[in-house]
Every structure is written in structure tokens, then in C-alpha cells.
Image: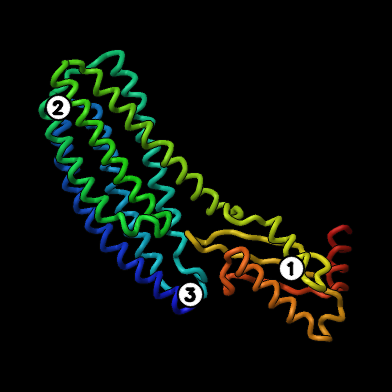
């Protein structure tokens, strides 16, 4: 990274750590209240919310660890530092949310068939406490939640818990005024519907990065076409692109040039044009581009070896 980018990223990481620490303290407080509420009310919706709060707490701890690891400088053993910790943390948070969602779905179906006795007034009180705590967490994270996938996952977990608390409140009101205890199971199903699709989206994004898929915002065929249209370029091969961490795409490739380009100075011009094209048109920072220029005769030898 250049100096400006590194300083900006470092400031984001410090701000993210402070905000995550505050939200973690709020989450633990709400979690204690909700665990007491589950014992008192026997509510599945509240139990689902407790599961989400447990996931949040674990997720926020992982997010904090990931931010600390991402701040470590690169070394000869870890040339990208620990930037991937952010991606792994986001993936684990998403997996936890999906697991809790599946359990809640199965239990909600069971309670729709065999409803349980619910303490509506106690459920309402705990739901309000949870909603207030989650709104406070959202306000703390709102300015930094798009910084990276790790922060996005943490924000998503708190947002989902706010929605869960709201569903708990609504079900408590319904039970209180109508006595329809299946409202608790219905609220649980709504919570699952809110959580699982968003968690699956984060899981898909992190999986793509860990499997080093081409960044979604990058059209590699278009990149190849642009490079092939540069003067003197005969071929482009071994073109690879992946993402190290959120907002950090890297690209490498081989460009084949006529042999004479390496004698008349055109090779440097082609390299400048290629890196400028990749930076200006495809959004890849210059220091994350690796281009190898090959004389035509060397490329021909490699082609013969591949087909031998």
C-alpha cells in the first residue's frame, strides 16, 4: 500500500476497534437481560434473539480480533500481513447466523403445531430492552459499517438483532391482548426470514474471496480485450485476478510482445500503457498490478512445452 492508503486504512481500523468495543459492551449487557427473560417467559422468539445475541457477541469478539490482526504489518512470512483475518471473521459470523436460523426455523415449526405457554408482559419488557440496546449499537456502527466485510457482518448482526427485538415486541403485544401464543413462533419465523438471506450473501462473498475467484466488479474478459488492443501486444495469457481483503483486488498476467520491442524501447511504453489502463479503467491500484512482458520467441517456446 502507498503511504496515504495505509494511513487511511489504519485510521479506519482504529475507529472500527473503538466502535466494535462499545457495541460489544452493549451486546453483552442485552444478552444478560435476555437470558433472564428466556428463563422467565419461555419464549422461542426471545430464545432465538438470545441465540443471535450470543452470535453477535462471538462475532463482535472475532471482528475485534480480526481488526487487530489486520493491523499487523506484512513480513517475509506473511507478505499481505493478516488482512485475510477480516474475511475469515465475516465468514464465521455468517455461518453462525445461518446455523441459528436453521435451529430457530425447526423449533418454530414445532411450536406452531404444539404451542407453549408464554409470559407476554415479561416478553414485552425484555424485547424493549433488547431493541433499545440494538439501536444504540447501530448508531455506534453506522458510520463505519461499509469499511469492509468484517464491519458489514458485525453491523448486519446488530441490525438483525434489532429486527428480532422488534418481532419479539410485536409478538408480546399480540399474546398480551389476544392470548394467541403461536404469535411467538410466527415472530421467530420472521426473524429467520430476515437473517438467513443476508447472512448467506455475506457467506457467498467471503467464499468467493477465500477461493480466490475473480472480483465481481472486475470483468476479466474485458481486461484481456483492453490489453490486446494496446500497440505491439500480440497475446495475453495467465491472466489472474483475486481479492486479498475488502477493496483490495490484485491482478497479474503475461503480455507477449515482438522481440524487437525489447531493443527499441517499446516494451516500457507497453508496460506503462497496460498498468495505466488497469488502474484508470478497471480500478486496480498500480502497486497491486504485476505484469510480465515476454518476447515472442520465449512465448513460442512455452507454448511448445505446454503442447509437448
Counting residues from the N terminus, which is met first, the one under dot 1 or under dot 2? 2
Rendered location of residue 66, percent (x, y): 37, 60
Counting residues from the N terminus, which is met first, the one under dot 1 or under dot 3? 3
Left or right placement of residue 84 versus residue 13 in this view: right
Residue on which disc 1 sits: 254
Give the Cα distance between marks 3 and 2: 53 Å
Residue at 27% over, 48% down: 57
| CB atoms of marks 3 and 2 within 8 Å | no
Query: In this rendering, which labeled residue sits more in front, label 1 or label 3?
Result: 1
- The residue furthest top is 113
Counting residues from the N terminus, which is met first, the one under dot 3 or under dot 2? 2
Residue at 25% over, 31% down: 167
Residue at 45% over, 79% down: 3
Question: What label does residue 299 carry, if any?
Answer: none
Q: Neighbour class for label 1 at 10 Å: few (<14), some, many (≥20)?
A: some
Q: Neighbour class for label 2 at 10 Å: few (<14), some, many (≥20)?
A: many
Rendered location of residue 41, percent (x, y): 14, 27
Residue closer to the observer: 299 or 176:
176
Give the Cα distance between marks 1 and 2: 65 Å
Q: Is residue 150 above or below residue 104?
A: below
Residue on which disc 2 sits: 41
Label 2: element kind: helix
Residue on which disc 3 sits: 75
Residue closer to the observer: 131 or 280:
280
Left or right placement of residue 266 versus residue 1 in this view: right
Rendered location of residue 73, percent (x, y): 43, 73
Quadrant of the image containing the C terminus: bottom right
Label 1: element kind: strand
Residue at 56% over, 62% down: 249
Amino acid at each position: 500500500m502507498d503511504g496515504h492508503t495505509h494511513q487511511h486504512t489504519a485510521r479506519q481500523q482504529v475507529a472500527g476497534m473503538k466502535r466494535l468495543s462499545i457495541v460489544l459492551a452493549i451486546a453483552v449487557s442485552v444478552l444478560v437481560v435476555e437470558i433472564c427473560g428466556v428463563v422467565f417467559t419461555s419464549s422461542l422468539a426471545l430464545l432465538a434473539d438470545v441465540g443471535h445475541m450470543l452470535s453477535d457477541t462471538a462475532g463482535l469478539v472475532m471482528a475485534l480480533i480480526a481488526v487487530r490482526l489486520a493491523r499487523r504489518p506484512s513480513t517475509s512470512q506473511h507478505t499481505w500481513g493478516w488482512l485475510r483475518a477480516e474475511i475469515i471473521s465475516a465468514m464465521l459470523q455468517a455461518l453462525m447466523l445461518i446455523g441459528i436460523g436453521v435451529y430457530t426455523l425447526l423449533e418454530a415449526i414445532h411450536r406452531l403445531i404444539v404451542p407453549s405457554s408464554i409470559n407476554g408482559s415479561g416478553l414485552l419488557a425484555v424485547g424493549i430492552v433488547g431493541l433499545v440496546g440494538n439501536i444504540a449499537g447501530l448508531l455506534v456502527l453506522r458510520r463505519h459499517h461499509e469499511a469492509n466485510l468484517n464491519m458489514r457482518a458485525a453491523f448486519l448482526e446488530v441490525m438483525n438483532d434489532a429486527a428480532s427485538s422488534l418481532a419479539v415486541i410485536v409478538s408480546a403485544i399480540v399474546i398480551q391482548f389476544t392470548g394467541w401464543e403461536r404469535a411467538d413462533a410466527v415472530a421467530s419465523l420472521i426473524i429467520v426470514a430476515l437473517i438467513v438471506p443476508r447472512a448467506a450473501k455475506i457467506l457467498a462473498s467471503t467464499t468467493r474471496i477465500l477461493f480466490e475467484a475473480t472480483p465481481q466488479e472486475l470483468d476479466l474478459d474485458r481486461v484481456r480485450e483492453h490489453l490486446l488492443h494496446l500497440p505491439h501486444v500480440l497475446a495475453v495469457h495467465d491472466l489472474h485476478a483475486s481479492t486479498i481483503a475488502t477493496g483490495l483486488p490484485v491482478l497479474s498476467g503475461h503480455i507477449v510482445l515482438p522481440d524487437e520491442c525489447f531493443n527499441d524501447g517499446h516494451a516500457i511504453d507497453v508496460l506503462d500503457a497496460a498498468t495505466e489502463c488497469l488502474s484508470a479503467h478497471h480500478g486496480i491500484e498500480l502497486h497491486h498490478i504485476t505484469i510480465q512482458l515476454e518476447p515472442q520467441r520465449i512465448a513460442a517456446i512455452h507454448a511448445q512445452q505446454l503442447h509437448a
